[in-house]
Image: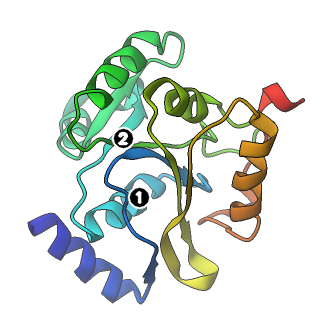
Amino acid sequence: MIRQRLSRGIVRLMRYRMVGEVPQSGILVGAPHTSNWDFVTMLLVMWHDGAHPRVLVKKQLFKGPLGWVIRAFGGVPLDRENPGTVVRELVDEAGSGEPFRLILAAEGTRSKAEFWKSGFLRLSRETGLPVTLAFFDPPTRTMGFGPTFHASDDVRADMDIVREFYKDKHGIRPRNATPPRLREEA
């Protein structure tokens, strides 16, 4: 309740408009991922409707007091070199029957790159949970949720949904955005 009130107050002060509805369970893609502030904005989006998500964050950020803060906000340390253990634990947690929301930055970095990471589609297929596209768009002063879909075996068709939704979303630093494209499509 406190997080929800805090989020709603901050969103109101920022003069942003929330759109869409928080899913009960699912894999949430937060994009564009162009700034360190994206973590905070995705939490605001989730907390606005009372959701308490898990957020994959690179393990290097869990050192010292910052690690405690990130964990308190739902952060899960991810070893990018060996993500299998964390992913298996999350798949097990998602299968528990309790509401499960996991936010991923599919771009994998705040800098412009060539491809997105495909983990969000793999997790959706492995868990049976839907993918929901979430965003923060400063030029339009909107944030929230877009379409929800179940990952299929047709990666290109799934990514066409993603590309269509994010084509007009800019993020905090638009020049850092990576266009939605997976290595598997190349």
Q: Quadrant of the C terminus?
A: top right
Amino acid on which disc 1 is placed: Met
132 on left or right of 78: right
Q: Of 176 and 92, which appears nearest the observer?
A: 92
* Rendering coords of residue 171 (x, y %): 61, 65
Name the residue rendered at 85%, 31% in the picture. Answer: 185
Q: Which residue is mark 2?
A: 55
Instruction: Count residues near mark 1 (Cα–Cα under 10 Å), then give few for <14, some for 14-19, many for 20+.
Output: many
Amino acid on which disc 2 is placed: Val
19 on left or right of 118: left
* Rendering coords of residue 96 (x, y %): 22, 28
Q: Which residue is mark 1?
A: 42
Q: Are marks 1 and 2 in contact (CB under 8 Å)?
A: yes
In the rendered image of this protein, does residue 82 appear above or below residue 4?
A: above
Answer with the quarter of the image where residue 174 lies: bottom right
Q: How many marks?
A: 2
